[in-house]
Structures are given as C-alpha cells and as structure tokens.
Image (cartoon, rainbow, N blue to C red):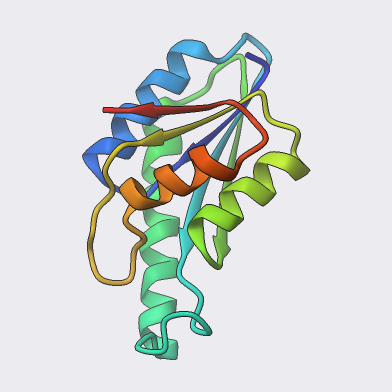
Amino acid sequence: MRRILVGIDGSEGSEYALNKALMLIDEYGELILLAVIPSKDVHIFLDDQTHRSLEEKAKHLLDEIMTDIGEQDFLLKPLILTGSAAEVIIDVANEMDVDLIVLGSRGTGSPGWHDFGSVANKVVQFAHKPVMVVR
C-alpha cells in the first residue's frame, strides 16, 4: 500500500496498529501517524493547560515513534490535530487519499485522549476508505 494512515494514542492497540501498518507499507510509500487531541469545544473540562499538556504528550509520543522506526525507504508524516477523533481520521484519510486506515481496537481510555475502540467503530461505519482494526 502506498499511503497508510495510523491512529496513534499511546495505547497497546495503537502500537499493534502501527506494527501492522509497518508490515503493509510499500517501499517509497507514506505512513501517516495521526494523533487527535480532543477539542475544547466538545470537552468543556479541557482547560488551556490540559490541552497544551495533551499536545506535548502527543508530540513526545510521535517523536518517540519516529525515532524507534528510524530511517526507512518510506516517508513518515506525523500529524497532531484537534477535534473529534473519528471525524478527523475520516477527513484526513479523504484529504490525503489514503489506501488504508489502521486503528487499534482499543485505545487508552485515559482522560483527555479519545477511546480508539469507540472511534474505530465510528470510522468503520462512516469512512469511505478501507479500514483495518487490529487487536
């Protein structure tokens, strides 16, 4: 596959999804690592400090993954976006014309992060791109 989007949230499920995507990506393809931070508009309990903290956590997580993967023949593109996780994943998949969306079946469930289990269900239902949910 030439372009794969992987939902990243720091959970074991997203780690499995990343490993599967690494097996499937074409040489000279593009692997998009997407972390979605909840919007303050949707989650009113998120103050500015918490939101910044989540952004820092996401940046650190993506930096770690990029370092762990190292230099490859394919392009790694880290993205941190804010919004409703399922909607953002579907929008990015459409905008970047991905061949596959890969998500873990269960997310972190941590406060402030989206639960990728329920997000995966929504993406499977509404995405117009192929979706692989990894356990």
Which quadrant does the C terminus fall into?
A: top left
Question: Which of the 4 image quarters holds residue 69?
Answer: top left
Q: What's the residue at 63%, 9% (across, down)? A: 27
Question: Which of the 4 image quarters holds residue 12?
Answer: top left
Which of the two residues, 19 or 69, is positioned nearer the viewer here?
19
Say left or right for 32 vs 58.
Answer: right
Q: Is residue 33 visible?
A: yes
Which of the two residues, 94 or 72, is positioned nearer the viewer here?
94
Question: Which of the 4 image quarters holds residue 26?
Answer: top right
Q: Position of residue 59 (x, y in %)?
A: 45, 57
Residue 25, compared with residue 116, is above or below; it is above
The mark tally for this picture is 0
**Farthest front residue?**
125
Q: What's the residue at 44%, 12% (across, down)? A: 23
Q: Position of residue 45 (x, y in %)?
A: 35, 88
Q: What's the residue at 42%, 81% (across, down)? A: 43
Which quadrant does the N terminus fall into?
A: top right
Q: Is residue 63 visible?
A: no
Which of the two residues, 128 or 73, is positioned nearer the viewer here?
128
Q: Position of residue 108 (x, y in %)?
A: 24, 53
Residue 29, compared with residue 51, is above or below; it is above
Residue 43, compared with residue 31, is above or below; it is below
Say left or right for 76 vs 116.
Answer: right
Residue 89, compared with residue 36, is above or below; it is above
Q: Position of residue 121 (x, y in %)?
A: 41, 44
Say left or right for 12 vs 46.
Answer: left
Q: What's the residue at 65%, 31% (across, down)? A: 129
